[in-house]
Structures are given as C-alpha cells and as structure tokens.
Image: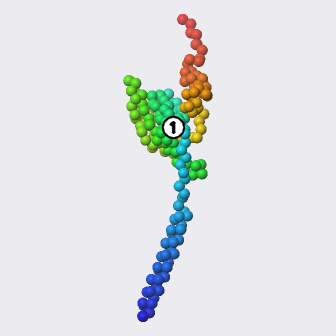
Amino acid sequence: MSIFSRISMGAVAAATAALAVCTVTFAAAQTQAAPVAADRITNPVAEFAGIDKITGRIITFDVYIDETVQFGALQVTPRICYSRPETEEPKTDSFVEVDEITLDRKIRRIFTGWMFAESPGLNAVEHAVYDVWLKGCKQKSDVPPPEAAKTGASQVDTSKSKAAATPAATEPDSGEAN
C-alpha cells in the first residue's frame, strides 16, 4: 500500500471519528438547551378592559368562563383562558365570543377568536363605540362566581358604581329662581 493510501485511509477514519463526536455533542447540546415546554394553566376567570369611546372611560371587568357579561352594547363570553406559570415567559390567551346588541334588539356576532394579553391590539374587538381587549387570566375574582350569584349567597355592593354612573342624580338641585 502506498503512503498516499495510508494517509487517505487515516484521514477518512479521523474525519469519521470527528464527525461522530460532533454529532453526539450536538445532539446532547440540543436536548439540554431545548426549553422544557411549560404546562398551560387553565383559569376560571378572564379579565378584560373596555373603553367607551363616547365618554372616554376605561373599565376593567372580570368574566367567568362560559358566562356572559354585557359591556355597553356588547356581550362578552370567554370560553377558555390560558396562562403560564409565573416562572415562565408570560403567554396569556383566551378564546372569546363577542356579540353586539343592535338597535332593533337583535344579537349579532361580531368577534369569535383568540385574544392575547401580551398583544392587545392583535385581536381586540374594535366597535364603533366600544373596544374590548384581554388583560389577563385569573384564578380568583372579587366578583362572586355564577353559582353564588344565582343563590344570593354573596351580594356585590353596586351602590358606588351606580353613583359613579349617574352623578347628576346624586347632586343637589341648584334651586334656580324663576
């Protein structure tokens, strides 16, 4: 066998061994560096924000999954609300249905889809008068759950919100003379 053949055979063997080591090292690095997929947390409450473009008021409201809450002329119904553990990158999303109550009292679906809390402008509901977007998902809410509301076990004090909604009704008459 010539010297050239011996060098070529040795080079091929060395290259093959180096390739095997690189492949094993690369595969090991991929399995160690790949992030472990965090489990999604299913939450019973979706937190939304809405703006009334006429008054300029921004309201935050909680809605239990599969329950409907009316915001102005819109009815908001979250079907599922997912979040990630606090140790992971935040990814909060909810599948939501939004209906509009028209002037002739008909209900018309204006949105069905996923909303993302980290990108509120991506799939927010943009209505002529009202906008609604997802703020987050929660395990608990100050609003009583639907079962408690139906049985009357816990009542929510709405006197403050009624007074804020109709400030003219609580102010004394100026008593102008005729």
Decide which of 37, 92 is in the foreground and name it: 37
Where does residue 121 sit, x and y in percent of width and height?
46, 42
Residue plotted at (54% across, 63% down): 33
Q: Is residue 33 visible?
A: yes
Vertical comparison of 29 with 90: above or below: below
User: How many numbered discs?
Assistant: 1
> Which residue reaches farthest bottom?
1
Where does residue 112 sit, x and y in percent of width and height?
42, 39
- Name the kind of residue labelled 1 in the image: Ile
Where does residue 84 sit, x and y in percent of width and height?
55, 48
Residue plotted at (55% across, 53% down): 38
Q: Is residue 52 visible?
A: no
Vertical comparison of 136 with 105: above or below: below
- Quarter of the image where the N terminus is located: bottom left
Where does residue 145 sit, x and y in percent of width and height?
57, 33
| Residue 107, image quadrant | top left
**Left or right: 174 as drawn, with respect to 115:** right
User: Is the residue marked by circle 1 packed among few (<14), some (14-19), or many (20+) residues within 10 Å?
Assistant: some
Vertical comparison of 136 with 73: above or below: below
Give the labeled residue for mark 1.
65
| Residue 124, image quadrant | top left
